[in-house]
Amino acid sequence: MNRIPFLILVVGLTFFSGKAEVKDEITKLEEELQQAQLRKRFTDAITNEEWEIALDCCSERVVSESENYDTKELFFLQTVPVAVIKNGKTFSIGRYHMSRMENGLLTREEGISLAFQISNSATSLSINWRAKMRKIDGDWKIDFEPIPLSKQFEDLLNPMINAEPQK
């Protein structure tokens, strides 16, 4: 076998596979930049009380739920740890991968998880406020359970209040 065509083939494959790896790395870096920009836009909007901008960063589910409140400000004040964000605390950030069966098909989802631990000084209890950054129709959006923080603390307290006394 002639070694020159073989060497050309090996060099060509190395060149093209290297291009794919570089392209994958560039795509990954672009997505990380988009995610960082979204986090900054969201936290800046909350800090500056620009509720429409903050809502623009959110998923359709969150936007839809906000319509049940008298104002966007009230929605955010009740469902997001606004004071924690305004005080400059940063999110704990992680990646998540989730698989589930949906209509007989296995669907996979991955994204970025964001979290804060929030303490209630009156009760010495804390909850974790969690959100996810998901890519929805090509855009990264922030999604969270739009449940009032006070309800989350109540849900944490109720089992303790209703527990039978120890004998």
Image: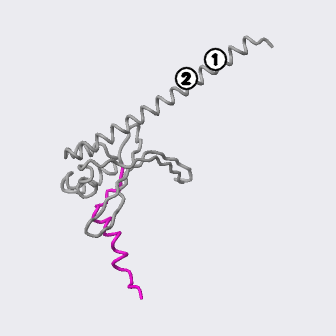
Return the residue found at the far right: 1
The residue lying toward the viewer, choosing from 2 and 86, is: 86
Residue at 35% x, 48% y is: 91
Query: Which residue position is annotated with label 2?
Result: 19
Q: Quadrant of residue 159?
A: bottom left
Around disc 2, counting alpha carbons within 10 Å, would you say few (fewer than 14), some (14 to 19), or many (20 or more)? few
User: How many tags in the picture?
Assistant: 2
Residue at 68% x, 19% y is: 10
Residue flagged by tag 1: what amino acid is it? Gly
166 lies above or below 136: below
* Residue 28 appears left or right of 19: left
First in sequence, mark 2 or 1: give its number. Answer: 1
Residue at 22% x, 57% y is: 69
The residue lying toward the viewer, choosing from 120 and 76, is: 120
Assign a secondary structure to mark 1. helix
152 lies above or below 61: below
The residue lying toward the viewer, choosing from 21 and 166, is: 166
Residue flagged by tag 2: what amino acid is it? Lys
Based on the picture, tell me whether residue 106 belongs to the magenta stretch.
Answer: no
160 lies above or below 4: below
The answer to whether the residues at label 2 and label 1 have Cβ atoms under 8 Å apart is no
Check the picture and name the quadrant holding the C terminus: bottom left
Residue at 29% x, 70% y is: 123
* Residue 20 appears left or right of 69: right
Magenta residues, as a range? 143-167
Query: Which residue position is annotated with label 1?
Result: 12
Assign a secondary structure to mark 2. helix
Q: Quadrant of residue 13?
A: top right
Based on the picture, tell me whether residue 165 belongs to the magenta stretch.
Answer: yes
